[in-house]
Amino acid sequence: MFLATLHRQSRDDLWLIDGPEEFIRMVIDQQRDMQTTGYEKNHPDAMDLVIEKLGVSIGRVRVSFMEREVRVLEIALLPEARQKGFGTAVLRALQQAATRVMTPLTLCVMRHNPAARTFYHTLGFRQAASHPMFDLLVWLPPPQPST
């Protein structure tokens, strides 16, 4: 139930559809179902983790540990938990994990989301590839000193 609520509250773009609220909810729920099916098919190893603060669910992150990279498939926070450092803390933790195994951390950002793009750039992500709807961003672990 929490994940469905989170998805509805994190799809501001779909709430712009001109139509009855019940229709918009149906579209958002169908989009979530298709997204989940796609993730399960293309990233069967992905972990879906709920982000909590003091035992209260405030978001989620879906991560795939691929052969040559760690891919953040999705990160979402409830509106009241945004811009409070939680997303930064989660991504910094994933950067630390990627550093331990010396692999890139990647994610995709929608082209029409400049706020997210700016946020990821402040965490050191850089554009690696471009697609019509989104860009692939990459963060590389710092080089390890040779011994």
Image (tube, helix red, strand yellow):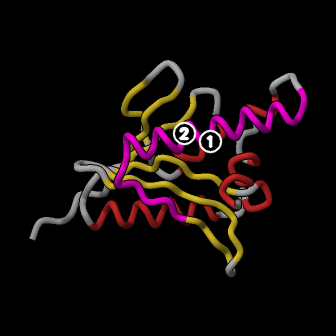
Q: Residue at 65% of width from left, 63% of height from top?
A: 85
| 28, above or below 92, in the image | above
Secondary element under disc 2, as helix, strand or loop, is helix
Q: Nearer the viewer, residue 143 or 70?
A: 70
| 20, above or below 64, in the image | above
- What's the amino acid at mark 1? Arg
The reply, left or right, for residue 62 in relation to residue 85 is left
Looking at the rendered image, the quarter that the C terminus falls into is bottom left
Q: State which quadrant residue 39 falls in.
A: top left
What is the chief secondary structure element of the magenta stretch?
helix
Q: Which residue is mark 2?
A: 35
How many residues crowd mark 1 within 10 Å: few (<14), some (14–19), many (20+)? some
The reply, left or right, for residue 107 in relation to residue 146 is right
Q: Nearer the viewer, residue 62 or 1?
A: 1
Residue range in magenta is: 20-49
**Farthest residue, direction bottom:** 54
The reply, left or right, for residue 146 in relation to residue 36 is left
Q: State which quadrant residue 54 falls in.
A: bottom right
- Rendered location of residue 24, percent (x, y): 80, 33
User: Is residue 3 part of the magenta span, yes or no?
Assistant: no
- Rendered location of residue 30, percent (x, y): 66, 36
Q: Residue at 74% of width from left, 32% of height from top?
A: 14
| 137, above or below 56, in the image | above
Q: Nearer the viewer, residue 144 or 33?
A: 33
- What's the amino acid at mark 2? Gln
**Farthest residue, direction top:** 132
Q: Do callouts 1 and 2 mark residues in contact (Cβ within 8 Å)? A: yes
Q: Nearer the viewer, residue 96 or 15?
A: 15
Q: Residue at 33% of width from left, 55% of height from top?
A: 65
Q: Which residue is mark 1?
A: 32
